[in-house]
Image (tube, grey):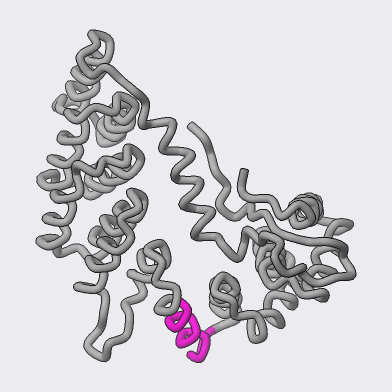
Amino acid sequence: MKKITFFTMLFILLMPAFAQEEGVYNRFRHSRDEYIEIGRDLAKDYNRDIDCNDKEIRTDIIEYKSIFHSDTSSIKSKRDALHGLVYTNCQEVINFYVGLIKNDLNQEIRKDALLYLGWLRAKSSIPSLVEVAGKENNLAFIVEIAVTLCVMEEFELAASILDRVCFNEDNSVKRICIGGYAYAGRDELVKNYYLSEWEKDIDEEQQFSIALKLTEYGVYDITFPIIKETLINSTHTYKRHSAISGLAAIATEEAIELIQNCTNDNDIVVANFAKFVMECLKEGRRYK
């Protein structure tokens, strides 16, 4: 199974002394589009042309379902069986996942079944997912249903499900729904949410996190100072790694110069990532 590091972004550049050139692709400014492309690529691994009546495939399905239903199976064994079933890509398996989402009492099992429906791009399950979302009391699971619909590229349907449950009485958006709205493409809503969070009394850690999110929506003036400060002063590799990603999105002359300076950083992880970013910026490369 392919493993994707979602924080490894590819960017754009000519030379360290110049800001981003217009018209050159900047992957980080299109992170949602990139994520969708990754999903399409991964879907090819699971949407294989399979003869579901083939003896070997039938044996696999029966075996995995037997493991799942066994009284002696642990939750881990059940979850492993669900994962095994996804490679068979048959309607029987899709129906099995849907039944678990509707009826199983274990949330991990339900979440796994939902995840695998997304992997399979199982559009035949959409009416059932909409039905479950309408009856579900767990807001987090409703959001996960919406995200799964986004994986299937049913963005408007996903957003409509979120719209029914994701607003407070004062018409503000519930925090738990923001990731779903981001994936559904409600850019202005998500941007305004983070701008409102920015105005609150928040600590530096929260401010840095929100600054990174805002760079995805074209907000650079207020975010640059804190991202720059984090890159220069933080002792945490991951935070400095993230700061480089944020600077690559901003892509002004100063931002690019800061990335270039990190190519000789004492932290080898930071230095290597900065070199990687500089190379990819120059090429305007997409995630592939």
85 in magenta: no
Q: Is residue 268 left or right of residue 206?
A: right
Q: Is 273 situated above or below 229?
A: above
Q: Is residue 49 above or below residue 109?
A: above
- Percent x, y for residue 59? 23, 12
Give how far across and how far down residue 120 sits, in percent.
32, 37
- Horizontally, residue 246 falls left or right of residue 93, namely right
Give the vertical position of 137 relative to 61 (above or below): below
Residue at screen point 26% across, 15% down: 57
User: Residue sitting at 27 percent across and 32 percent down?
Assistant: 82
Q: Quadrant of residue 67?
A: top left
Quadrant that contains the C terminus:
top right
Q: Residue 171 falls in which quadrant of the image?
A: bottom left
Q: Residue at x 25, y 61 (%)?
A: 157
Compare residues 159 and 80 and report the one nearer the observer: 159
State which region is magenta: 191-202
The image position of residue 257, as x and y in percent, is 85, 69
Which residue lies at the image location 19% right of the left edge and 44% below the top edge?
A: 125
- Magenta span: predominant SS is helix
Residue 23: x and y in percent read 69, 65
